[in-house]
Amino acid sequence: MKKLTLRNNGQIKEAELNFGDLTLLVGPQVSGKPNEQEKHNSRPVSEDDAEFSVAAIGLMLREIGWARP
């Protein structure tokens, strides 16, 4: 899946999401994440996915100078 269009999903009236190689849906509890995951037959986030994401965000923040090496 490369693109997802949401309409009338919880507090979201309309949104279009374009996906890259790794895209994480993050939000508070009871905001519809599992519904979208199930609707589009995507797998749950694993511990490895979460660790990779945190490392990638840290690298990005260091590269733009917002975090110390």
Image (tube, rainbow, N blue to C red):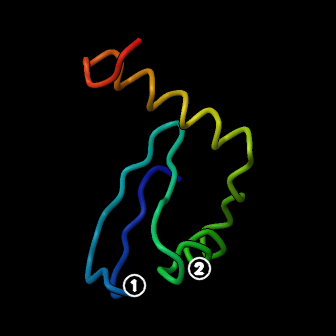
66 w.r.t. 31: above or below: above
Q: Locate residue 15, reporting x and y percent.
A: 28, 69
Residue designated by label 1? 9
13 w.r.t. 5: above or below: below
40 w.r.t. 22: above or below: below
Figure label count:
2
Q: Is residue 24 left or right of residue 5?
A: right
CA gap between label 1 and label 2 equals: 9 Å
Q: Earlier in the sequence, mark 1 or mark 2?
A: 1
66 or 2, nearer to the observer: 66
Q: Quadrant of the C terminus?
A: top left
Looking at the rendered structure, the kind of residue marked 1 is Asn
Residue at the spot x=45%, y=67% of the render? 27
Looking at the rendered structure, the kind of residue marked 2 is Asn
Which of the 4 image quarters holds residue 5?
Answer: bottom left
Residue at the spot x=68%, y=53% of the render? 45
Which of the 4 image quarters holds residue 67?
Answer: top left
Residue designated by label 2? 35
What secondary structure is marked by label 2?
helix
> Mark 1–mark 2 contact, CB under 8 Å?
yes
Q: Residues within 10 Å of mark 2 (few under 14, many from 20)?
A: few
Residue at the spot x=25%, y=17% of the render? 65
- Residue extending farthest to the front is 68
Residue at the spot x=59%, y=79% of the render? 35
Q: Locate residue 33, reporting x and y percent.
A: 54, 72
Which of the 4 image quarters holds residue 12?
Answer: bottom left
Q: Using the image, tell me which numbered label, if any, was put on residue 23.
A: none
Q: Locate residue 48, reporting x and y percent.
A: 73, 38
What secondary structure is marked by label 1?
strand
Q: Residues within 10 Å of mark 1 (few under 14, many from 20)?
A: some
